[in-house]
């Protein structure tokens, strides 16, 4: 009995020490480490909560494919996303072409992939719209009218349409009223409801609102623009970047996504390169020289 008592006392002394020395099992880790978590920021198509919910299925699948966790970083403007990536407070982000060129040329980022829309389309268009019953038939007739843009860093909601308006002799000061309404759907709805006489928006906005588009008139439509890319901060590790890129291209193959993209205008991913957005750079230079 004395001998057993000594053994028990020795066990009580050594077990805590063994617990400290032995490596813990990864399966029992309650929280992922910082290197296992990627922070995500995207342009405000919806509210921050709305975006998180809309992209929920996609990121759940990415978690399974990569082993990473994803944490949302709220962004109210396009500039917020640019700043998050430039400052390192976000690891990856979804941006428009104009925002991509801005953050790439001024801070440097890594292009993960470009997005595809329905039927695997790689391009989209900017447009300026009015109502069929507005009495407006040309851009020149917009002088003195109420006009909506989306965001000053939006490709199709500001950059391309503003360049076209300037080609037609119009600048923001020539309108009776100008509003920036953040989202493409907001711009389209403002015109549809008669809250603005005309507005700039993306052609993809048609799929985001429940309206009778036959009541709308397209005054101008841009050349094709490659859809916006997913990007990573410039110093994201090669291992993280490559694993994420491989997973996104794999699950984003046309026809392979199932229901992952339900509720999104994005329907897949494709590899891209920086020069895909050179036409955006040309318009930026044109705007800067005027």
Image (cartoon, helix red, strand yellow):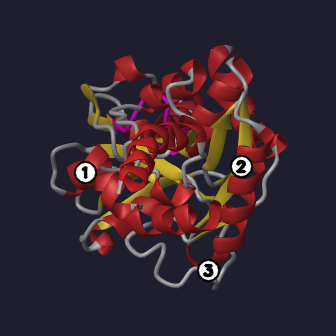
Q: Nearer the viewer, mark 3 or mark 1?
A: 3
189 is within the stretch colored magenta: no
* Sequence order check, earlier mark of 3 and 1: 3
Mark on residue 119?
3
Q: Residues within 10 Å of mark 1 (few under 14, many from 20)?
A: many
The residue segment tinted magenta is 149-157
Q: Position of residue 154 (x, y in %)?
A: 49, 37
| Residue found at x 63% / y 26% | 103
Mark 2 lies on residue = 112
Q: Quadrant of residue 188?
A: bottom left
Coordinates of residue 281 in the picture (x, y in percent): 73, 31
**SS at badge 1:** helix
Q: Cα distance, mark 2 to mark 3?
A: 21 Å
Q: Quarter-wise, where is residue 73 in the image?
A: top left
| Residue 128 in sight from this viewpoint | no
Q: Is 75 on the left or on the right of 91, as rendered? A: left
User: Is the residue under label 3 in contact with that under label 2 (CB below 8 Å)?
Assistant: no
Left or right: where does residue 60 sit relative to residue 150?
right
Q: CA distance from mark 3 to mark 1?
A: 28 Å
| Rendered-image quadrant of the N terminus | bottom left
- Quarter of the image for residue 62 reads bottom right
* In-front residue for pair 262/171: 262
């Amino acid at each position: 009995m004395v001998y057993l008592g000594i053994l028990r006392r020795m066990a009580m002394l050594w077990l805590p020490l063994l617990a400290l020395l032995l490596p813990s099992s990864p399966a029992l880790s309650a929280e992922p480490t910082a290197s296992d978590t990627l922070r995500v920021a995207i342009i405000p198509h919806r509210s921050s909560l709305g975006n998180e919910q809309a992209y929920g299925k996609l990121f759940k699948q990415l978690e399974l494919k990569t082993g990473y966790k994803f944490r949302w970083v709220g962004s109210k403007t396009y500039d917020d996303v640019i700043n998050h990536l430039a400052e390192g407070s976000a690891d990856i982000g979804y941006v428009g072409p104009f925002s991509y060129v801005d953050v790439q040329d001024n801070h440097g980022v890594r292009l993960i992939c470009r997005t595809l829309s329905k039927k695997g389309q790689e391009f989209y268009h900017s447009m300026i719209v009015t109502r069929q019953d507005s009495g407006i038939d040309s851009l020149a007739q917009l002088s003195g009218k109420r006009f909506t843009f989306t965001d000053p860093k939006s490709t199709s909601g500001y950059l391309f349409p503003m360049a076209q308006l300037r080609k037609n002799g119009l600048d923001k000061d020539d309108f009776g009223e100008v509003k920036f309404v953040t989202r493409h759907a907001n711009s389209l709805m403002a015109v549809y409801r008669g809250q603005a006489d005309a507005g700039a928006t993306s052609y993809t906005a048609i799929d985001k609102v429940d309206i009778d588009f036959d009541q709308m008139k397209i005054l101008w439509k841009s050349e094709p623009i490659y859809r916006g890319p997913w990007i990573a901060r410039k110093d994201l590790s090669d291992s993280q970047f490559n694993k994420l890129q491989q997973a996104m291209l794999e699950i984003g193959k046309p026809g392979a996504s199932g229901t992952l993209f339900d509720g999104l205008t994005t329907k897949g991913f494709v590899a891209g390169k920086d020069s895909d957005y050179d036409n955006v750079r040309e318009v930026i230079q044109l705007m800067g020289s005027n």
